[in-house]
Image (spheres, helix red, strand yellow):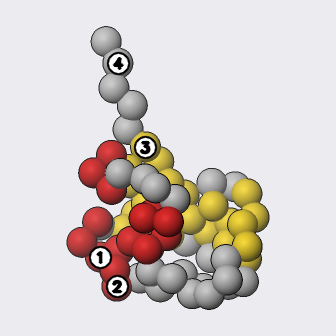
Amino acid sequence: MILTINGKQVPVEKPVSLDALVAAKGLCPEKIVVEHNLCIIAREDWPKITVKDRDMIEIISFVGGG
């Protein structure tokens, strides 16, 4: 199956939840926002959302600065 993650097509072997996808990418959940098919998903709902072929995912991270 193919996902579009941050504008790039990425092959994924099987359907996974958003929280598993974030964990597989080694990202810190507290520092990102995940958009699934143009909808921002609350962190507590990530385990409930399973990505499917051709889904679009945007992962935005917060960056601090001075």
Q: Give the left or right position of residue 66, taking residue 3 as reference.
A: left
Can residue 54 be seen at all in this image of the molecule? no
Q: Name the residue under label 1.
A: 45
Alpha carbons under labels 1 and 2: distance apart:
5 Å
Q: Name the residue under label 4.
A: 65
Q: Which residue is drawn at 29% across and 66% down?
A: 42
Residue 45: x and y, percent?
A: 29, 76
Q: What residue type is labelled 3?
A: Ser
Label 2 environment density (alpha carbons within 10 Å; few <14, some 14–19, many ≥20): few
Can residue 16 be seen at all in this image of the molecule? yes
For marks 3 and 2 on the same chain, the one whose residue lies earlier in the sequence = 2
Residue 37: x and y, percent?
A: 55, 71
Q: Mark 2 points at which residue?
A: 48
The secondary element bearing badge 3 is classed as: strand
Q: Residue at x 46, y 55 (%)?
A: 26
Q: Give the left or right position of residue 26, taking residue 53 as reference.
A: left
Q: What residue type is labelled 2?
A: Lys
For marks 3 and 1 on the same chain, the one whose residue lies earlier in the sequence = 1
Dot 2 and dot 4 residues touching (CB under 8 Å) = no
Dot 1 and dot 2 residues touching (CB under 8 Å) = yes
Q: What residue type is labelled 4?
A: Gly
Alpha carbons under labels 2 and 4: distance apart:
33 Å
Residue 39: x and y, percent?
A: 45, 68
Q: Which residue is drawn at 57% across and 87% down?
A: 15
Residue 12: x and y, percent?
A: 67, 77
Label 3 environment density (alpha carbons within 10 Å; few <14, some 14–19, many ≥20): some
Label 4 environment density (alpha carbons within 10 Å; few <14, some 14–19, many ≥20): few
Q: Name the residue under label 3.
A: 61
Q: Quadrant of the C terminus?
A: top left
For marks 1 and 4 on the same chain, the one whose residue lies earlier in the sequence = 1
Q: Is 31 located above or below residue 34 in the figure?
A: above
